[in-house]
């Protein structure tokens, strides 16, 4: 679906133009066209391919979707895939995608499987004509910067969730729930990492060294995006290590609890073993057992068993087994 189709001259909006006129404005040296699509159909992508002269492989990737974040060069144009992340109801992490085609005098973005939009990005760019005057390179930066900036609230939310779990680690009986939440959090961290790390590797193409001509005047801006991605990547690595440590601590707590239960069972088993031993001895049917004929034999036996069991109970209690 078409969201915007706007032509700009010298950094200022010229007009909203129909799709059929795109190729006419792209052919001009003093103008560039910025088109935004959402969940574009194969037919819409085919029309855009004809109007902008897009490479067929890039259009094929955009139509297929679910691409790994990347930056590819096709002559003097670029094809960029960036993941869009958002936390929806129930704190479930949703992954969308934006495919961006960039040429010397055009930018085409196709947002798919995401409720986020770039209307604020366009408005911000139009308020800064001195920057928008740099053309497609600055628009690409503005789009990528907007996507990457939206990663930070997600990182903050994941860190807060991790802190809440850490507060419950030593609460008795919460270990199973903690482990389930930690593995769910680990899955979310890996989803974010799959969006960040490939893009961090790819964006190095846009600053320093041999830079595509369309981004030559905006290298400093892309270096800033690279720094943001590096901060996010470092935070993700730290969270991964913390989650791994928390899982090990939870498993250790489970083992300790099981050890405490085993000690209690062993202590009670020892006490009842004494009772069983006494009962087994006096339950033997031998004829010559003088204590069996003793008048006070039964109460004496009970007293002896009670004293021995009481002594064992005190020793186990003192040792912390009961």
Image (cartoon, rainbow, N blue to C red):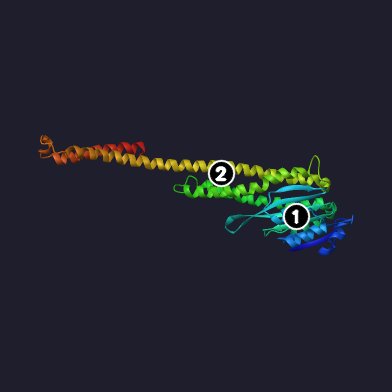
Instruction: Give the quarter of the image for residue 88.
Output: bottom right
Left or right of 309 on screen, residue 153: right
Q: Residues within 10 Å of mark 1 (few under 14, many from 20)?
A: some
- Name the spot of residue 304 as percent of width and height, x first: 20, 37
- Name the spot of residue 45 as percent of width and height, x first: 75, 59
Q: Residues within 10 Å of mark 2 (few under 14, many from 20)?
A: many
Residue pushed farthest right? 29
Residue at position x 61%, y 42% from top?
A: 238
Residue at position x 62%, y 42% from top?
A: 237
Along the viewing direction, whichever of 73 and 114 lies nearer the viewer: 73
- Name the spot of residue 140 as percent of width and height, x first: 78, 52
Left or right of 47 on screen, residue 27: right
Q: Is residue 229 at least partly visible in the picture? A: yes
Q: CA distance from mark 1 to mark 2?
A: 39 Å
Residue beneath disc 2: 243
Residue 293 - label: none
- Of badges 1 and 2, nearer the viewer stands 1
Q: Secondary structure at mark 2?
A: helix
Q: Is residue 322 at least partly visible in the picture? A: no
Which quadrant would the C terminus be assigned to in this image? top left
Along the viewing direction, whichever of 316 and 258 lies nearer the viewer: 258
Left or right of 211 on screen, residue 254: left
Residue beneath disc 1: 59
Number of on-image labels: 2
């Amino acid at each position: 679906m078409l969201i915007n189709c706007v032509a700009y001259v010298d950094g200022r909006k010229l007009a909203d133009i129909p799709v059929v006129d795109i190729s006419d404005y792209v052919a001009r040296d003093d103008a560039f066209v910025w088109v935004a699509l959402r969940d574009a159909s194969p037919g819409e992508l085919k029309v855009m391919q004809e109007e902008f002269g897009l490479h067929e492989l890039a259009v094929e990737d955009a139509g297929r979707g679910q691409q790994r974040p990347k930056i590819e060069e096709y002559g003097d144009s670029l094809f960029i895939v960036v993941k869009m992340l958002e936390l929806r109801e129930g704190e479930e992490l949703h992954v969308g995608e934006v495919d961006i085609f960039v040429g010397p005098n055009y930018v085409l973005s196709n947002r798919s499987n995401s409720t986020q939009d770039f209307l604020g990005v366009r408005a911000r760019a139009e308020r800064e004509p001195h920057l928008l005057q740099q053309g497609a390179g600055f628009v690409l930066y503005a789009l990528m910067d907007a996507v990457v900036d939206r990663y930070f609230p997600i990182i903050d939310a994941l860190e807060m969730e991790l802190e809440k779990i850490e507060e419950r680690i030593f609460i008795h009986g919460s270990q199973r729930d903690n482990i389930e939440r930690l593995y769910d959090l680990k899955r979310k961290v890996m989803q974010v990492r799959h969006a960040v790390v490939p893009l961090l590797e790819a964006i190095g193409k846009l600053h320093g060294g041999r830079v595509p001509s369309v981004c030559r005047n905006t290298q400093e801006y892309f270096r800033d995006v690279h720094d943001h991605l590096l901060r996010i990547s470092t935070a993700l690595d730290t969270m991964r290590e913390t989650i791994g440590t928390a899982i090990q601590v939870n498993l250790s707590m489970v083992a300790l609890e099981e050890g405490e239960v085993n000690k209690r069972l062993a202590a009670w088993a020892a006490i009842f073993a004494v009772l069983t031993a006494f009962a087994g001895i006096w339950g033997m049917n031998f004829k010559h057992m003088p204590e069996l004929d003793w008048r006070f034999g039964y109460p004496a036996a009970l007293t002896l068993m009670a004293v021995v069991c009481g002594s064992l109970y005190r020793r186990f209690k003192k040792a912390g087994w009961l």
